[in-house]
Image (cartoon, rainbow, N blue to C red):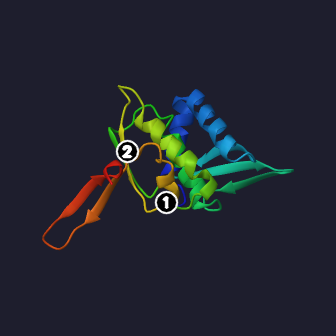
Amino acid sequence: PSGEHLAPILNALRRKNPKGFNRLLRRIKKLFPTVSSISIEGGGDRGSQSIRIHEQNGRDVSFNSRQVSDGVLRLLAVTSLLYVERLPSVITFEEPENGVHPQLIREVVQILRELAQRKPPNDCQVFFTTHSPYVLDEFYDHPEQVFLVERGRPQEGTNITRLSEK
């Protein structure tokens, strides 16, 4: 919830792939125009690192990761996956839209699509669950990409159907 596991990933990205980190920062700035930079603090003897998000909105202000919303951290985490060198072959999310402003849900879905469209050797499959009609709206033109999972009666098991078949 406070980005403590995200900070080392961003720090490694910044050190090992500065161009990727800058591309990540540019994308975040498009989503949040007041963001001016992202820094990582710590990592010394204790090894703990934290994220600091800097904004410029008439004056310079910075926030640690405990002061920003879950949605901002979630978007930062999901977006960072686009720029890391090695992805797992399967990525799963439970309700990736949680905490994200409704106007930014389209961007979350777009990022997940970009992850799923990566080419070898860094390709991966992306699975996520949602109850959000806003997320489902993003698949209006591609109902074959959505699967409905419905619990049947006891002893009958689970039914899985493509939305395009309904």
> 3 or 133: nearer the eye?
133
Q: Secondary structure at mark 1?
A: helix
In the rendered structure, find residue 145 and report the number of the disc placed on it. Answer: 2
Gap in angstroms between the C-alphas marked 2 and 1: 15 Å
At x 25% / y 56%, what residue is drawn? 160
At x 32% / y 38%, what residue is drawn? 89
How packed mark 1 is, by other alpha carbons closer than 10 Å (few <14, some 14-19, many 20 or more), is few
In the picture, measured across the screen, residue 147 lies left or right of residue 115, that is left
In the rendered image, residue 61, in percent from the top left (x then y), is placed at 78, 53
In the picture, measured across the screen, residue 76 lies left or right of residue 85, that is right
Q: Which quarter of the figure is the C terminus placed in?
A: bottom left
> 137 or 112: nearer the eye?
137
Q: Is residue 131 above or below residue 144?
A: below
- The amino acid beneath tag 1 is Pro
Q: Is residue 93 visible?
A: yes
Label 1: which residue? Answer: 133
In the rendered image, residue 46, in percent from the top left (x then y), is placed at 50, 52
In the rendered image, which quarter is residue 22 located in?
A: top right
In the rendered image, residue 70, in percent from the top left (x then y), is placed at 57, 60
Mark 2 and mark 1 lie on one chain; the one further toward the N terminus is 1
In the rendered image, residue 140, in percent from the top left (x then y), is placed at 47, 48
Q: Is residue 4 visible?
A: no
At x 17% / y 65%, what residue is drawn? 157
Q: Secondary structure at mark 2?
A: helix
Residues tagged 2 and 1 counted as in contact (Cβ below 8 A): no
- The amino acid beneath tag 2 is Gln
Q: Given the current orientation, which residue lies at the most extreme left position?
A: 155
